[in-house]
Image: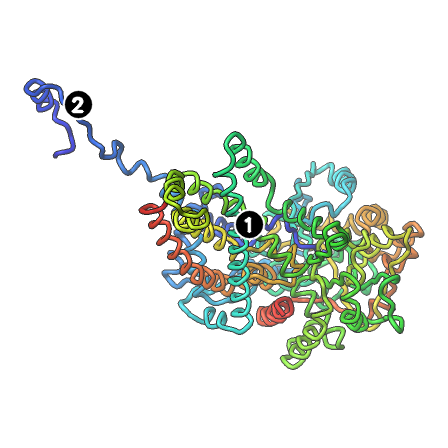
Amino acid sequence: MTNEPRDHLNLLAPRSMRPKFDYLHREVQDLAGMRMSRRAALGLGGLAILAAAGCGGSTNAGGGNNGAASQPADALKGKPLEDSLVIYNWSQYDDPSTYKKFAALPDESAAGLKIHETYYSSNDELLAKLHAGGTGYDIVVPSQNAVGELIQEGGLLKLDFNLIPNIKNLDPKFLKSSFDPTGEFHVIKDFGITMFFYQNTVVKPSSEPKTMKDFYGLLNANASKGRTNVLDGAEEVVPLAAMALGFDANTGDPGELDETKKFLLSVRKGVTTISSFGYINDASAGKIILSQGWNGDVRRILAARKKQGDITAVLPTEKSEVWADSWCIPATAPHPVAAHAWINYLLEPATAVTEMNYHSYPIPIPAALDQMPADFKNDPLFNVPASYTDGYQYILNPSPQLVNARTKIYQEFKAA
Amino acid sequence: MTVGPDPGMAAVATAVKPKKRGRSFAPKYPAWLTLPSLLYYAIFFLGPMAILAVFSVSIQSGFGSVTYTFSSSQFSQVNDSLYITVFERTLLMAAMGSLLTIAVGYPLAYWMARYLSTYKMLALLLIIVPFWTSFLIRTYALKIILDPHGYLARDFGIDVLYTKYAVGIGLVYNYLPLFILPVFASLERMDWTLIEAATDLGARPVTAFKDITLRLTLPGVVTGGLLVFIPMCGEYIIPDILGGGKYEFVGNIIGDTFSSAQNWPFGSALSIALMGALSVFVVIYIMFATREEQFGA
């Protein structure tokens, strides 16, 4: 989930320090040429980095993997299945039975394959770990912007589709995407979109709101009636507003960014909260009258307010955000054959049905979607019609400069 | 030479002189025994600070990566109307929060020290007990009290959640014990017979309080005030939760710069700038802390 709410519980220990520590740990291990405990490494780490700075050294994170990514696509041909698979994933993102069934497949059980899984709570955390040279992972599940970044840095393995025959099950429209134009580095795990909703007993628009721009238009007039909310994060606030104005989500044009900023500041007084965290609970309790939200969350809010029936959910026409999490294999994966086998297994329609029932996000496998219960299959908030998503865009991180500019606009919006 | 005892000499000394009972007040143990503590401090406190300082003069070379140089470019970026506004707001809110903490905390500490005897320790315990619960949980609990549908809003018309007033309430609530404890200690140590003497000599209670109690505890108040002011300036969670994410402190800006922009040099420069701004107040704190040692009650 791109848009995983910020994990406030983790923030008690400043999260910014963690990637730094991990990075240091790695760096010191490299220098020392041996494995050592984190604690031991961090003891020397401060000194090591000082020494590096003293020499004017330059460290480019993610470097060093570049060679591996450009290997021929069929390098794995004929290689045996390994006995281990290390997955680095969002927590509770796959049905527990999927792991058991995968390990029990004939080839996998013959190889004695064991699955190890560790978790992260944000793309920043995943990227920091991989930037710091975190090797040992066979499968990672980055969101679209992180996939783009990792491809740019040469951090991902080119997939060998001979080992993933089930790719034929995937909706062909999801094979290539703006963040991986050749489609060689990722397989979509699931996707979602950004929409909005309002309490129709309180917010009474003069005409039916249809687009994201209509959402922003409702803010100023309704903020006095109750809590209004927009999704948090520089990568949400700015691109969503840019798209509402008809610009490209990832625009770097100074004029367009400036216009986006002015537009955001003009609706600022209509915004009560800027939050991606806890809006499901608050809206379910009837405390939010107008808000943006991700489709999976809005489904839950609608279900919670079913009795009152006072929530109107709107799938925006024109432009909005589509996000996707993907299966990827790091360039340094120690068990690439097992990783391919895993991706292939997850593309089985039967597996996809189990998975969708578990996490409630659509997987673009038509044969699997057909098997879903009617309340999923026929719900446009789950099975979002292509007529909407065709106009939607992935929000990416094209360059550090653009992300810095975006972050500054976001900060000005928040501080205004 | 003078340090190592010579057994022969010592034997002679004891033989000649009557046993001397004097003892040295110099430290008994060698100083290097502090080394583990010093190392801990150097590695886990100075180390991260050094990393921060190195990053702050570096240049961003990509997402979450850094080219080490010596450049002031990050600091010139800090000098921007947006960041200056946020710095001013943070310092102002922390100052208001500290003053309010003093206004709420001083009477409480005074009451505990002057009026309570049997239940003094119980009161002290009740002040400290909230510290046993996570800071985060307590802040969320405050959100329930301040809820627009809650009693405070419905029956008293105090509907301030997601405004700067809620942030202020959160600051005072969370930092109050940190202020009460030093002030209570300084009130406890005060010689109350001075008040009796003043009253005997005809001073009105107000005069006695102003000229004696307040004067003697003022260093404690300043110490306590700065003890809450400084962490308030670095506050991150309270503005995020109670301000609805739209009342940014410097801490929030730094967090965004590190995590979502993955711009470590600029985030470090902002952190160093905040430390610079705060060091002025730390100097005041040290001055008062030293004065309290000399004159304070």
Residue B160 seen: yes
Q: Residue furthest left?
A: B16
Instruction: Work out whether mark 1 precedes mark 2 in sequence or the reverse, and give the earlier one.
Output: 2
The local crowd at label 1, few if under 14, some if 14 to 19, many if 20 or more residues have their Cα within 10 Å, is some
Name the amino acid, label 1: Val
According to the image, label 2 marks what residue? B21
Q: Is residue A232 left or right of residue B46?
A: right
Front disc: 1 or 2: 1
Letter of the chain that mark 2 sits on in the rendering: B
Residue B217 horizontal/vertical position (percent): 41, 47
Q: Which mark is residue A35?
A: none
Letter of the chain that mark 1 sits on in the rendering: B
Residue A340 horizontal/vertical position (percent): 71, 51
- Distance from disc 1 to disc 2, alpha carbons, whole Å, reads 53 Å
Q: Is residue A378 left or right of residue A52?
A: right
Describe the element under mark 2 as helix, strand or loop: loop
The local crowd at label 2, few if under 14, some if 14 to 19, many if 20 or more residues have their Cα within 10 Å, is few
- Which of B177 and B15 lies nearest the eye of the viewer? B177
Question: Quadrant where the N terminus of chain A lies?
Answer: bottom right
Q: Is residue A87 left or right of residue A48?
A: right
Name the amino acid, label 2: Arg
In the picture, residue B89 is in which quadrant?
A: bottom right
- Residue located 19% across and 28% down the image: B23
Residue A265 horizontal/vertical position (percent): 68, 74
Q: Residue furthest bottom?
A: A255
User: In the picture shown, does residue A345 fall above or below B277?
Assistant: above
According to the image, label 1 marks what residue? B104
- Residue located 57% across and 71% down the image: A401
Q: How many marks?
A: 2
